[in-house]
């Protein structure tokens, strides 16, 4: 399978989206809604937030699993 490399705009958006989602998720939502020009960048912003959300969920699941094992 030949996978396509992500564009530089997507990567930049992903990293910025991840950091903004950590600091102020509501600001990220406003930014995403206000931009409609660079679709790769905006998609990267959204995916950066989703990655942060996944990591938070995994940490929560690990904590729950750890507490269950301690019982």
Image: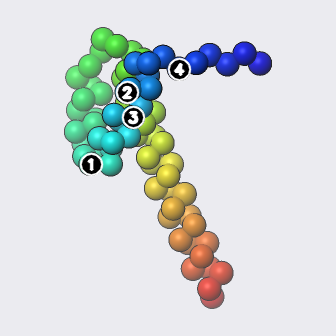
Question: Which label is found at residue 15?
Answer: 3
For the residue pair 47 and 5, the one nearer the viewer reads as 5
Name the residue furthest top: 37
Q: Give the Cα distance between marks 2 and 1.
A: 15 Å
Q: Residue at x 62, y 85 (%)?
A: 70
Q: Give the Cα distance between marks 3 and 2.
A: 6 Å
Where the C terminus falls, by quadrant? bottom right
Q: Give the Cα distance between marks 1 and 3.
A: 13 Å
Residue 56: x, y in percent? 46, 56
Question: Which label is found at residue 31?
Answer: none
- Name which quarter of the figure residue 41 lies in: top left
Q: Give the Cα distance between marks 4 and 3.
A: 13 Å
Question: Which label is found at residue 6?
Answer: 4
Where the N terminus falls, by quadrant? top right
N-term mark: 4 or 3: 4
Q: How many marks?
A: 4
Q: Give the Cα distance between marks 2 and 4.
A: 11 Å
Residue density around tag 1, few if under 14, some if 14–19, many if 20 or more, within 10 Å: few
To which residue does mark 2 refer?
Answer: 13
- Residue 65 located left or right of residue 60: right
Q: Is residue 48 depicted above or below 3 in this figure?
A: below
N-term mark: 2 or 4: 4
To which residue does mark 1 refer?
Answer: 23
Q: Is residue 26 depicted above or below 45 in this figure?
A: below
């Amino acid at each position: 399978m030949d996978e396509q490399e992500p564009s530089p705009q997507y990567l930049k958006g992903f990293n910025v989206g991840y950091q903004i989602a950590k600091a102020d998720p509501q600001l990220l939502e406003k930014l995403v809604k206000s931009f409609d020009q660079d679709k790769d960048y905006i998609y990267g912003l959204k995916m950066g937030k989703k990655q942060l959300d996944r990591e938070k969920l995994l940490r929560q699941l690990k904590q729950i699993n750890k507490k269950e094992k301690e019982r």
